[in-house]
């Protein structure tokens, strides 16, 4: 008996069936999908100017005109590597087979979710080059764990077929933005023979720094928030920020159910806002506390600009910041107390701003993460070959 897909093929014109069969033989599903929206594929360094080259592989989910977290962190890595003298190129995965052989000692960064868009031919080709993959949780008993916490397992983990595709590419290592104590939620990757490391998000100092110009538009803003609002995160946001709605100014790509929503904000203006507002809160998805998960990039941005942030009750922050660098509340009530204290206490704001800034520039920039990646790959950027 024919499968559902085969039945449909049998009804197609012979010539179209031949074309589909030809595509199948290439094992390359990349030809059948939309492409990434890449507006600036390279930086200032010519691609032939370095001894190694960073290739950031993306798929249709990447849109360089929309500064969501998955776009901004990729750009942060690109700029950090360029500051180290490593040229970069952002490429749709469909172009990797032609691109990689043309570059000096390429190494690839790929988000694991994009493997659903990568064909077998590209997977096989990746084995020839150093590459590292951002992965999702994979641990024993995950389905029961997520069900117990009223979460859909399929939202937070991938099917076995997807994981196999990643493993078949033979990555140099896999990573997560989760802090060290959360690596237990990724233990199965290591059990399947892949090296796993923690690479938290960080600050792109080429944009987020204290040199941001003064912006008259942001005069007298007491509290400001930049980001999206959706159902799961909205519950967390409302718990912490709704009591301050009258003082809160909000910018974001989607409309908020808050009176202070002012629409979109350009990335160029964002650092000025972080520097000028008295407080810029950082609120995470509820699962971040549960999974010791991906600490929001905003804490690094705000502190990197010399601003002041107050975070939600996520103990994992303490793995990245000391008590005198960042205050972490026990719950939303202590959060509210800290906010009110900071709003009226300039000396306290200056203290946390100064120490938080020093923490970021000394430990939590994308330059720090880029150097760690080069070390993990064993790449020497001076001679472009693996250390022996």
Image (cartoon, rainbow, N blue to C red):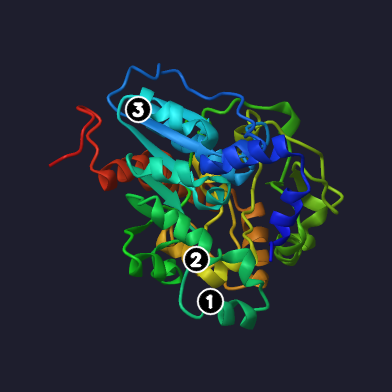
Side of 44 where 258 appears, left or right:
right
Return the residue at label 1.
142
Q: Is residue 305 visible?
A: no
User: Between disc 3 and disc 1, whose residue precedes?
Assistant: 3
User: Between disc 2 and disc 3, whose residue precedes?
Assistant: 3
Q: Nearer the viewer, residue 359 or 295?
A: 295
Return the residue at label 3.
86
* Residue 381: image location, x then y, percent: 25, 30
Assign a secondary structure to mark 2. loop
Spatial CA span between label 3 and label 1: 39 Å
Name the mark nearer the viewer: 3 or 1: 1
Rendered image: mark on residue 137? 2
Tell me, yes or no, whether the two marked residues, 2 and 1, touch with CB atoms within 8 Å.
yes
Assign a secondary structure to mark 3. loop
* Residue 197: image location, x then y, percent: 36, 57
Q: Nearer the viewer, residue 146 or 319?
A: 146
């Amino acid at each position: 008996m024919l499968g559902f897909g085969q039945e449909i093929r049998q009804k197609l014109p012979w010539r179209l069936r031949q074309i589909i069969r030809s595509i199948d033989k290439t094992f390359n599903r990349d030809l059948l999908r939309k492409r990434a929206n890449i507006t600036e594929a390279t930086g200032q360094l010519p691609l032939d100017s370095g001894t190694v080259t960073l290739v950031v592989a993306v798929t249709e989910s990447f849109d360089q005109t929309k500064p969501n977290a998955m776009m901004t962190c990729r750009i942060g890595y690109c700029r950090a590597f360029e500051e180290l003298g490593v040229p970069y190129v952002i490429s749709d995965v469909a172009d990797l087979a032609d691109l990689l052989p043309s570059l000096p000692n390429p190494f690839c960064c790929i988000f694991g979710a994009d493997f659903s868009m990568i064909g077998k031919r590209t997977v096989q080709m990746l084995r020839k080059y150093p590459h590292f993959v951002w992965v999702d949780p994979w641990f024993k008993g995950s389905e029961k764990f997520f069900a117990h916490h009223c979460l859909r397992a399929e939202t937070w983990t991938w099917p076995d077929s997807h994981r196999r595709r990643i493993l078949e590419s033979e990555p140099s290592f896999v990573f997560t933005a989760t802090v060290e104590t959360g690596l237990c939620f990724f233990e199965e990757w290591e059990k399947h023979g892949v090296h796993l490391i923690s690479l938290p998000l960080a600050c792109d100092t080429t944009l987020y720094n204290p040199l941001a110009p003064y912006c008259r538009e942001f005069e007298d803003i007491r509290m400001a928030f930049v980001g999206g609002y959706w159902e799961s995160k909205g519950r967390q946001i409302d718990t912490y920020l709704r009591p301050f709605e009258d003082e809160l100014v909000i910018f974001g790509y989607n409309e908020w159910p808050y009176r202070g929503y002012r629409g979109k904000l350009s990335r160029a203006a964002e650092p000025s806002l972080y520097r000028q507002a008295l407080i810029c809160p950082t609120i995470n998805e509820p699962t971040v506390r549960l999974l010791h998960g991906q600490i929001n990039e905003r804490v690094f941005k705000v502190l990197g600009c010399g601003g002041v942030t107050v975070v939600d009750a996520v103990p994992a922050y303490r793995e990245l910041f000391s008590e005198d660098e960042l205050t972490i509340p026990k719950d939303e009530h202590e959060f509210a107390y800290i906010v009110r204290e900071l709003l009226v206490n300039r000396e306290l704001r200056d203290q946390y701003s100064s120490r938080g800034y020093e923490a970021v520039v000394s430990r939590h920039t994308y330059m720090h993460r880029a150097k760690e990646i080069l070390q993990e790959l064993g790449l020497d950027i001076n001679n472009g070959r693996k250390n022996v």
